[in-house]
Image: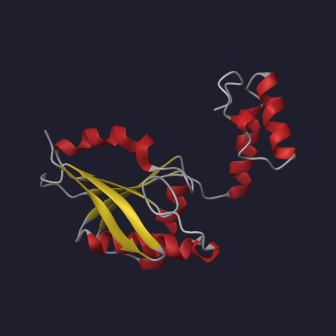
Amino acid sequence: MSSIKEGFLTVPGGKAWYRIVGNDRPGIPLVTLHGGPGAPHDYLEPLEGLADERPVIFYDQLGCGNSERPDDLALWNNGRFIDELLKVQEGLGLTKIHLMGQSWGTLLAGEYMLREKPQHVCSLILSGPFFSASRWLADQQNYLTGLPEEIQTVVRQAEAMKEFDSPSLSRGDARVL
């Protein structure tokens, strides 16, 4: 079984939680950037299967999952998230990585690659890329039309009232989420 290492790293604005599966493996580590922003890393855990050859690194971006949740609205910008990624790499002593972004994480990965031009990134993997907010919104509206009418109604009502944390969106009987 692969060794696992967990902890917290100081990043701009607070402390970010990380988990390394296969910490004892010799391969070039895979660093994962989860979706959201605001979604935790946990849906990416099936990637732990890659830890038989290399360390697989998960971290919850500040404000979600196991990481701290500061109230400072000035922290929520792409530049700070890139600085956070830099601090994670520095804190873990990563000199070579494979970088995988999923959904919002692809936007972060793309901006990181363009801004930092990192020489230590051996490969870039973009899963379910999010590079256009207008395209993403159009896709979500299209997906919504494929759901049962009662669920579409619940979602549209919540959107109209701007109640995105509405219990009706996550009720088991509505089967929305």
Q: Quadrant of residue 172?
A: top right
x and y percentages locating residue 60 in the rendered image: 43, 57
Q: Quadrant of residue 166?
A: top right
x and y percentages locating residue 68 in the rendered image: 46, 63
Side of 150 relative to 68 (left or right):
right
Identified at 48% across, 74% down, the residue is 114
Identified at 12% across, 55% down, the residue is 26
x and y percentages locating residue 121 in the rendered image: 32, 67
Q: Is residue 81 above or below residue 156?
A: below
Between residue 4 and residue 108, name the one nearer to us.
4
x and y percentages locating residue 86 in the rendered image: 38, 74
Q: Quadrant of residue 89?
A: bottom left
Total label count?
0
Between residue 101 and residue 77, name the one nearer to us.
77
Quadrant for the C terminus, please. Answer: top right
Between residue 173 and residue 77, name the one nearer to us.
173
Side of 135 relative to 82 (left or right):
right
Q: Is residue 75 above or below residue 21?
A: below
Identified at 29% across, 75% down, the residue is 90
Side of 61 relative to 107 (left or right):
left
Q: How is the image coloured?
A: secondary structure
Side of 50 relative to 173 (left or right):
left
Quadrant for the N terminus, please. Answer: top left
